[in-house]
Amino acid sequence: MSYNKRKNFIITNSIIVVFVLLLSLFINFYLTTLVGFTQDTFFVVTLTVLIFGLVLYLLLSKTIFDPLFKSDENLQKTVKETLHELNIPISTIKLNTQMLEKKITDEKAIKRLNRIKLASNELLKLYEDMEYHIKKEIDRVDLSDFSLNDIINHSLEKFDDLKKDIKIEVDIENITLQSDQNGFQKMIDNLISNALKYNLETKGLIKITYENKNLTIFNTGKEIDTKNLFVIFDKFFQEDKTKTGFGLGLFMVKEFCDKNKIAIKIEPTKEGNSFILSLKNIIKE
C-alpha cells in the first residue's frame, strides 16, 4: 500500500470510528433516558448499542474500503502478469545465444556473443530477484524440502567465473532442509559473494563446512574489526568502502535468518572470518 493510500486509510478509518462512537453514545444515552436508568436496563441497552455500532462500522468500512483493496488486488495481478511476460524475452535471448554459440567461429563475434550472454545472465538474475521479493511481499512464501548440497553447488556454479585463483573447499553432509528455498539460496549466494569479495587477492581460500547442525562459511582475508560486529548487518553498511556494492548483502542475510529462525554469528580471526549459521530449526528430520 502506497504512502498516500495508507494516509487516506488511516484518516478515513478514524472518521468512521469517531462517527460510529458518537452515534452509539447518543443512542445509548437516548435509550437509557427513554427506558429508565437501572442496572439491568443499562446492561441490555449498552450491549444492544455495541452490537449496533459494530455492525454499522463493518458496513461502512466495507463500502468505503472495498474499492481501495480492489485496486491493490488489480495492481498485484498486473505485477504477476508482467513478471511472467518478462521471463519470455529473457528465455528467448538465452536460447538464441546458446544456438549461436555452436555456429559462430569468428573470435570478435564470439566476444560480442559472450557479452550478450553475460548481460542476459545479469538480466535473468535481476528478474529472479525482483520476482522473489515481489512474491514475498504480496504472497505467502511456501516452505519446501531441499538439499543443502544442491543449494551450495548451485551457488558455487554461479560464481565459478568470478572466483579467479581463490580455492574453494566444501565438506558438508547431504542433509534435507525445510524452509523458503529461494530465500535460502539467495542468502547462501550473498555469503559466498561476500567471501569472494573480501578475500585475499592471492592464495585466497573459502571453506564451507557442516558440523553439529552448523553451516560455516570461512574466508581468508582481513579480520573484521570487533567494533563493526555490532553494525555489520545494518542496511547500507560497508566495512571496506573501496569494494563495489551497496551494503545490502549482509542486511538481506540477517533479515532472512531472523524470519526463518536461523541463528547467525561471525567469528573473526587473524586468518580470516567465519560466518556460522545454526540450521537446527530448519533441518527436516
Image (tube, helix red, strand yellow):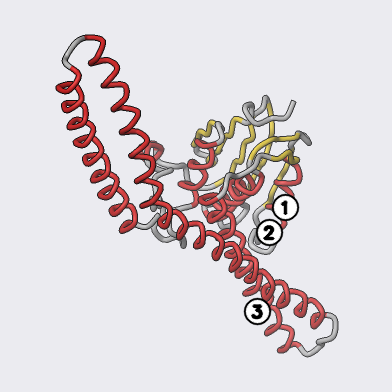
Residue 257 in the figure: left or right of residue 56: right
Residue in the image at 54% along x and 64% along y: 79
- Given residues 6 and 284, the one toward you in this image is 6
Residue in the image at 66% along x and 79% along y: 116
- Residue 216 in the image, given as x and y percentages of width and height: 62, 36
The amino acid at mark 1 is His
- Residue 199 in the image, given as x and y percentages of width and height: 55, 52
Q: How many marks?
A: 3
**SS state under label 3:** helix
Q: Please say if the residues under marks 2 and 1 sit with CB atoms less than 8 Å apart.
A: yes
Looking at the rendering, which quadrant does residue 33 occupy? Answer: top left
* Other residues around mark 3 within 10 Å, as few (<14) / some (14–19) / many (≥20): few
Say which residue label 2 marks. 158
* Other residues around mark 2 within 10 Å, as few (<14) / some (14–19) / many (≥20): few
Q: Disc number at residue 115? A: 3
Q: Is residue 95 above or below residue 8?
A: below
Residue farthest to the front, as pictured: 34
Whole-number angstrom distance, CA of label 2 to CA of label 1:
7 Å
Say which residue label 1 marks. 154
Looking at the rendering, which quadrant does residue 196 occupy? Answer: bottom right
